[in-house]
Image (spheres, rainbow, N blue to C red):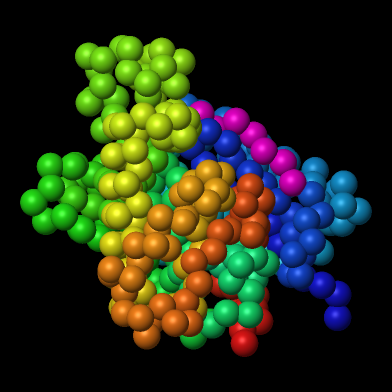
Amino acid sequence: MPEEIVLGYDVGGTKLGIGLVTADGKILGQARIENKDTYPEDVLPQLVTIAGKLVAEAGLTMKDVSGFGISAPGVADVAKGILTAPVNNKYWRNVPIQQYLQDNLGLPGCFENDANCGALAEGYFGAGRGVDDFIYLTMSTGVGAGIVTGGTLVRGVGLYGGEAGHIVIEANSGRKCSCGLSGCYEAYCGGRSIALYLQEKLKDQPGHKIVECAGGNVNDIDMVALEKAYRAGDALAQEIWAEMSLRNAQAMGLMINMLNPKRIILGTLAWAIGDIYTDPIKELLPRFAWKEMLADFELVNSELRRDIGTYAGAAAALYFLLKKPFKVS
């Protein structure tokens, strides 16, 4: 029987990725288009055109493609495949992207939260292969989670399962999260939240080392600037880094004690920064998780790294449309 082939779409705030992938993980074609402050009526037709081009360049027709998956950020109506109010694109409101692509590609489709799609991608092709129970954490602009237990993705009754970034880890916190709650895990460890916190804290300190590492503009402070200042030994950067590490360990400890996973797989920040990001978390985890839980536990980085976007939507298609099981132990 020929290998199944699927299309995957990864909707990001600045880029939108399209991949043509086989069920065993071979990338037959991929493309990216700009998606910063775009309008859906301009972009949606491109998604169809580019998909057709990728299929043709691979020597195939749409009849050879089994379906497509969409990996999308919140806020979204997952059940209906509608991008209701994605936080990174103010012009995309109540966009029925799944139905549009189904109608114009002539293929069945599915739609899922991007963190869940990341977990599926790692489960099929990355650091989750051969593992029955694992958690994938996005660790980027925000903190999202995809939870796999017994080889099954946890979705919940409202399809909101896995919002680990919005576990409240500090009840009386003044750190407001973009979700509307205060004291969320993401408020302490999400890249955007840390950047906004530092921008406010240093707005009247143009000579601070962290501002210097941001090119002299306080509004350009980001995780890259924080990392540079941390490596340079800046006291505030060291303080923020220590708090971030502690809160990461605290939140991950909650997940470990609750779900007893074999692995937690970390996305962008962890593999981009390296050991100085992950080592402090590993050292602190025994404060927050039982030794029995940690005995068989591994904290690892994503194997797919930058390619996870290419695989994410495709993995959703494999899981939801083709019902492909993970190759679990």
Q: Quadrant of residue 209?
A: top left
Q: Is residue 34 magenta?
A: yes
- Relative to 57, 201 lies left or right: left
The N terminus - image quarter? bottom right
Magenta span: chief secondary structure: strand
Q: Is residue 260 above or below residue 180?
A: below
Which residue is found at the position 39% from the left and 62% from the top? 283
Q: Which residues are magenta?
A: 30-36
Camera-side residue: 11 or 124? 124
Q: Is residue 185 above or below residue 192?
A: below
Camera-side residue: 261 or 52? 261
The C terminus - image quarter? bottom right
Q: Is residue 137 above or below residue 268?
A: below
Which residue is found at the position 19% from the left and 42% from the top? 176
Give percent across and percent down for residue 83: 42, 48
Instruction: Mark yes or no: residue 153 visible.
Output: no
- Relative to 191, 148 lies left or right: right
Which residue is found at the position 87% from the left and 52% from the top? 58
Q: Is residue 91 magenta?
A: no
Instruction: Mark yes or no: residue 120 visible.
Output: yes
Give percent across and percent down for residue 15: 57, 36
Give percent across and percent down for residue 188: 28, 46
The residue lying furthest to the right in this view is: 59
Which residue is found at the position 48% from the left and 48% from the top? 276
Camera-side residue: 97 or 253? 253
Q: Is residue 226 above or below residue 175?
A: above
